[in-house]
Amino acid sequence: MTQSARPNSQAGAVILLIEDDTQIRRFLRTTLTSSGYRLIESTSGQDGLHQVSTQHPDLIILDLGLPDIDGLEVTEQLRAWTSTPIIVLSARDKEGDKVRALDLGADDYLTKPFGTEELLARIRVSLRHMQQTLWIETPVYAFDNVRVDLEHRRVYVDEGEVHLTPIEYKLLTTLIRFAGRVVTQRQLLKEIWGPTYEKETHYLRIYMGQLRHKLEADPAQPRFLITEPGVGYRLKVDE
């Protein structure tokens, strides 16, 4: 495996690496950061699941042979609530393992040892596909005086950039994905925090309030980030 420092058009994307092998982690840390990605590392399946629900990575690289739970089970649990791309890296070369991983929802599968250029290419394809899936027409979404640059993960109000926390940004982009439609509290909680948070509705009240203060002209009388009482929230679109 050879390293590559070639600039990446998706620089800044956050990748979660779930891998217990120290040498592979060290190698991928150098490879991915030098290619412009931001890296989060986890050495077990349970911790990896926790990192996904709290850090909201753009892509997951997952080893199957983890010390606590099998990577196939991790894939299955993740696909119960998130569509974040998953690339499996594994020493298992049996076709059945590959088919099983893909059937459970993995986006791609590379067998160890793997080529660096191939891995980087697979990452670019997965990130591009995710972006095209979520934002079919344009990488920029605008409403009123708010502009969301989905490609570069930046938000502007009246052309001035506004800083959003990762959870605020995830909440906003989830509402954008379903723009004009009511998104239930349970659906938002499951997608943003994970399936164990489906009853924590106060989380949504807190973060929606913060989002309105940053984006709405009058947070007490929101025009676009609308509450549907007892149901959920809706991003209002122009008629």
Image (cartoon, grey):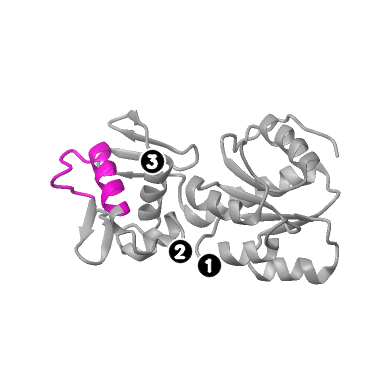
Please name the residue that numbered disc 2 is placed on: 195
User: Going 66% across and 52% down the picture, which residue do you hit?
Assistant: 44
Q: The residue under label 1 is which amino acid type? A: Ala
* Location of residue 105 (image quadrant): bottom right
Where does the image place residue 68, in percent across and percent down from the top left?
A: 68, 59
Of the two numbered discs 2 and 3 in the rendering, the one whose residue sits closer to the viewer = 2
Q: Nearer the viewer, residue 52 or 116?
A: 52
Q: CA distance from mark 2 to mark 3?
A: 27 Å
Q: Are marks 2 and 1 in contact (CB under 8 Å)?
A: yes
The answer to whether 1 appears left or right of 56 in the picture is right
Where does the image place residue 130, in percent across and percent down from the top left?
A: 56, 53
The relative height of residue 114 versus residue 64 in the rendered view (above or below) is: above
Please name the residue that numbered disc 1 is placed on: 80
User: Going 50% across and 41% down the picture, which residue do you hit?
Assistant: 151
Q: Which residues are magenta?
A: 203-224
Q: Nearer the viewer, residue 179 or 24?
A: 24
Q: Nearer the viewer, residue 37 or 69?
A: 69
Q: The residue under label 3 is which amino acid type? A: Val
Q: Determine if residue 155 is in view.
A: yes
User: Going 66% across and 59% down the picture, which residue do you hit?
Assistant: 107
Of the two numbered discs 3 and 1 in the rendering, the one whose residue sits closer to the viewer = 1
Please name the residue that numbered disc 3 is placed on: 148
Q: Within the magenta stretch, is there residue 40?
A: no
Q: Determine if residue 136 is in view.
A: no
Near mark 2 (Cα within 10 A), the count class, few <14, some 14-19 or many ≥20, is: some
Q: The residue under label 2 is which amino acid type? A: Pro
Q: Within the magenta stretch, is there residue 208?
A: yes
Q: CA distance from mark 3 to mark 1?
A: 28 Å
Where does the image place residue 23, in percent across and percent down from the top left?
A: 80, 39
